[in-house]
Image (cartoon, rainbow, N blue to C red):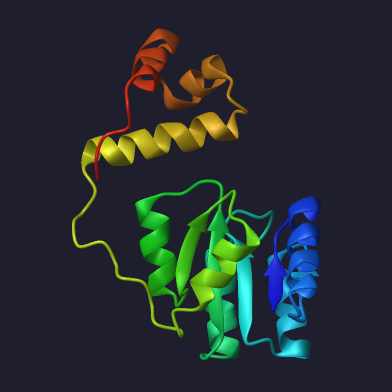
Amino acid sequence: MLVVDDVATFRDRLVRALVARGIEAHGAADAREGLELARRLQPDRAVVDLRMPGQSGLELVKALHELDGRMQVVVLTGYGSIATAVEAVRLGAVDYLTKPADTDQILAAFTKDGQAVALPQNTPTLARVEWEHVQRILADCGGNISEAARKLGIHRRSLQRKLSRLPPLE
């Protein structure tokens, strides 16, 4: 199994946990290194982080499937959104999990025998897409509300009001 994640502690812990379960696992720090390992080792499965420096996880999913169309790929992310989940599955991922995901959850995602997860039938509401975008910008700003408000082009208090509300339903 190939594990591609730019966070070294997470990647190393996941590789060790997989090896402890009797699964041959190898880690890569970015998409370029992951693709090189995939060409050399020809793994049956891969766990790919969505956001990495350089090439994104979605681009890597596409490249891995071009390399071997039978490879099962699970995408992991700390920035979950419906749009990226749909895109990951469209590119060939068998599942899409949000971090923190433990080893058992990741292995369970592979037990679907390579059948793609069902795509959402409903288009997300505008309120839901806006909420996900605000959350992503806030995470990119390290939780700094003032900086996030500047990037979003809204007043800080308006952003605070948006954040105080529950996320809209799908």
Give the residue at x 53% y 84%: 65
Nearer to me, 143 or 164 = 164
29 displayed left or right of 137:
right
The percent coordinates of residue 99 (x first, y second) are: 57, 50
Q: Residue farthest to the top?
A: 157
The percent coordinates of residue 14 (x first, y second) are: 73, 62
Q: In the rendered view, tell whether residue 91 sits above or below residue 50.
A: below
Q: In the rendered view, tell whether residue 109 sits above or below residue 53.
A: below
Q: Quadrant of residue 73?
A: bottom right
Q: Is residue 28 visible?
A: no
Q: In the rendered view, tell whether residue 153 sits above or below residue 16.
A: above
The percent coordinates of residue 53 (x first, y second) are: 69, 54
Instruction: State the count of labels.
Output: 0
11 displayed left or right of 94:
right
Q: Is residue 130 visible?
A: yes
Nearer to me, 61 or 75 = 75
Give the residue at x 41% y 60%: 85
Q: Quadrant of the N terminus?
A: bottom right
Q: Quadrant of residue 89?
A: bottom left
The percent coordinates of residue 169 (x first, y second) are: 24, 39
Give the residue at x 46% y 49%: 80
Q: Quadrant of the C terminus?
A: top left
Q: In the rendered view, tell whether residue 78 sits above or below residue 151.
A: below
Give the residue at x 54% y 87%: 66
